[in-house]
Amino acid sequence: MSGGPVSGGHASADRRGQARHRDEAALLKLAVDGDEHAFGELVDAYRGELRAHCYRLLGSVHDAEDAIQDAMLRAWRGLGGFEGRSSFRSWLYSIATRTALDITRHRSRRELPMCISPAASRGVGIDPPLTDSAWLEPFPDRWLIAAAAPAPEARYELRESVELAFIVALQQLPPGQRAALVLRDVMGFSAAETAAQLGLSAAAANSALQRARAAVKDRLPARDQQSTLRSVGDQRTKAIVGRYADALERGDADTLLSLLTADATWSMPPVPTWFSGHAAVRDFLMRYPLRERWKHYPTTANGQLAVACYLFDPDTATYVPAVIDVLTMEGDLIAAVTGFQMPDRHAPDPATAAQNATAAAQMFTNFAVPTQLPA
């Protein structure tokens, strides 16, 4: 590096970093002295990235929210024990990680239908939803904006680290290995920090990391969605989403199938039934979704293209939240449609139906899309 002056951009960034460190130190002192408002301001700066972190570990937005709430309570109660040997951010990650790992001891890993059963044959009916099973949940891309940029040591891009294939691969790992990989290769913490966060020796943490890396490498596709979407380009991807939504609304099976790869899959968690290949998918489409009235709204989920799907409700004469379709691309064709179904708003019990409608509206709000569309 030359001995010349630091560039204005770097100098400005340094000043912002120093100011944030001073502000954090002042807030930390107040929080240690019992100021709850100072503590709230202190942790709010990290809440977004911690939510994404817990989602990677748990595969569920709801479980991640529970983990964050519990972790913040643990951090408040344990604040007096923070000795400053690590950064406050690293200390929070330690608490959030251990809280998430505690949850994994009591709940099954999250999966998609392809993980638990073979594809259904053409003409097979759809099984009832398995609401008691632990299904993977979609994650809104807009929540990643609040997360900190990964450190230079990180091996995965921010959006790549929530892609469906990556989250599914993580869920197949033992929880400790899952945490080691996320802390090191997604968040970019050092080996020493990761070991401390997990309460392991350096050798044990490194062993968990190496095992996790090998297992994930075997399970991931050759190309991630970020690379694919960049190669296709924004204009083309918008056109694909538009044609996909239009074909569903018009009941046009031919156009819809022309957008899919020959071996494309279509799944609908919490429904365990899924289909693969044009013949089975066409049969499913003609017997089920293409017989309904739909409207759609583009969004993004898990670093991927997505579409919010609204089903016409004759009771309200409006289109109501029904599905979040997450699209996995292979070149400029759709290789997988993962349609995350909303809870049944027409459940026999009125209280349950109302609760389900509220949950569906909240899910769509999370994705910053309307909670209903006019007829």
Image (tube, rainbow, N blue to C red):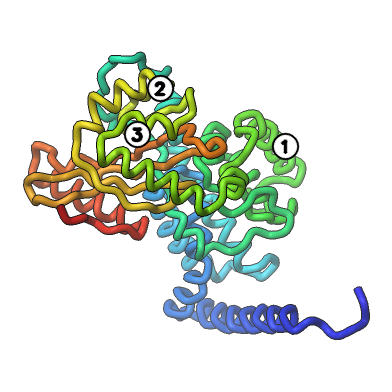
Provide residue 114's location: percent of width, then percent of height. 44, 26
Q: Position of residue 55 (x, y in %)?
A: 48, 49
Which residue is labeled 1 in the image?
Answer: 210
For the N terminus, give its image quadrant: bottom right
Q: Position of residue 330 (x, y in %)?
A: 55, 35
Amino acid type, residue under disc 2 in the picture:
His
In-front residue for pair 25/257: 257
Q: Which residue is mark 2?
A: 278
The residue where tag 3 is placed is 269
Q: Secondary structure at mark 2?
A: helix
Where 38 falls versus 56 (above or below)? below
Mark closer to the observer (1, 2): 2
Q: Is residue 244 left or right of residue 48?
A: left
- First in sequence, mark 2 or 3: give its number: 3
Rendering coords of residue 231 (x, y %):
61, 46
Q: Secondary structure at mark 1?
A: helix
Asked if one can make out residue 132 in the rendered structure from this viewpoint, the answer is no
Q: Residues within 10 Å of mark 2 (few under 14, many from 20)?
A: some
Residue at the image position 68 percent from the left and 65 percent from the top: 86
Left of 231 or right of it: where is 108?
Answer: left
Count of numbered marks: 3
Q: Give the residue displayed 30% in from the left and 42% down from the top.
A: 323
Q: Residues within 10 Å of mark 3 (few under 14, many from 20)?
A: many
- Report the front residue among 64 and 298: 298
